[in-house]
Image (spheres, rainbow, N blue to C red):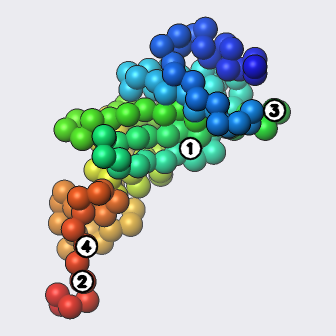
Amino acid sequence: MSESLELFRQRFPETQVFVKNPRRLYLTIPRGKITAAAKFLHQERGMRLSICTGIDTREGFEILYHFSEDKTGILFTLKVFLPKDNPQIESQGAWFPAAQWIEREMNELLGINFIGHPNLAPLLTPDHDWEPDRYPLRRDYERRNEAHER
């Protein structure tokens, strides 16, 4: 077992661990622990944030923060579930600039509110005619042929 995983489990005993393979670990944590867990991996274990992912599932939203432990080649993924009726989580961009752009994208495309984010301004959708509460990566997004509407 990886030293970082063992230390993580000691610090966050409520974590559910899924070992996909020896170099791919998924650590499911409560949303209230995301900042402490991310700071542990980055600040205490020296891991870098590779990317973040947001997914709209049938059960709710999954937010995945992928951290790379370059010295071992192991990818640690912090996995947090958010309910559909309360899609919000503490922003990591408030203390970790590397997370700011991807959190902005997840806010814009999935409607996830990142509490404490320094700037959730849209990046991809047109600001002059985009309807609020329209999130193109949500399962319930109604696709339209926008070319025929004009």
Disc 3 to disc 2, how far (Cα)? 48 Å
Circle 3 SS class: loop
With respect to residue 135, does 8 lie above or below?
Answer: above
Say whether residue 22 is left or right of residue 63: right
Indicate which disc, 3 or 2, sits on the residue closer to the N terminus: 3
For label 2, the residue is 146
With respect to residue 50, does 20 lie above or below?
Answer: above
For label 1, the residue is 98
Disc 2 to disc 1, how far (Cα)? 34 Å
Q: Amino acid type of disc 3?
A: Thr
Disc 1 to disc 3, how far (Cα)? 21 Å
For label 3, the residue is 72
Residue 17, which numbered label?
Answer: none
Task: Give the residue displayed 71% in from the left and 36% down from the top.
Answer: 21
Residues at marks 2 and 1 touching, judged by CB atoms closer than 8 Å: no
Q: Is residue 94 visible?
A: no
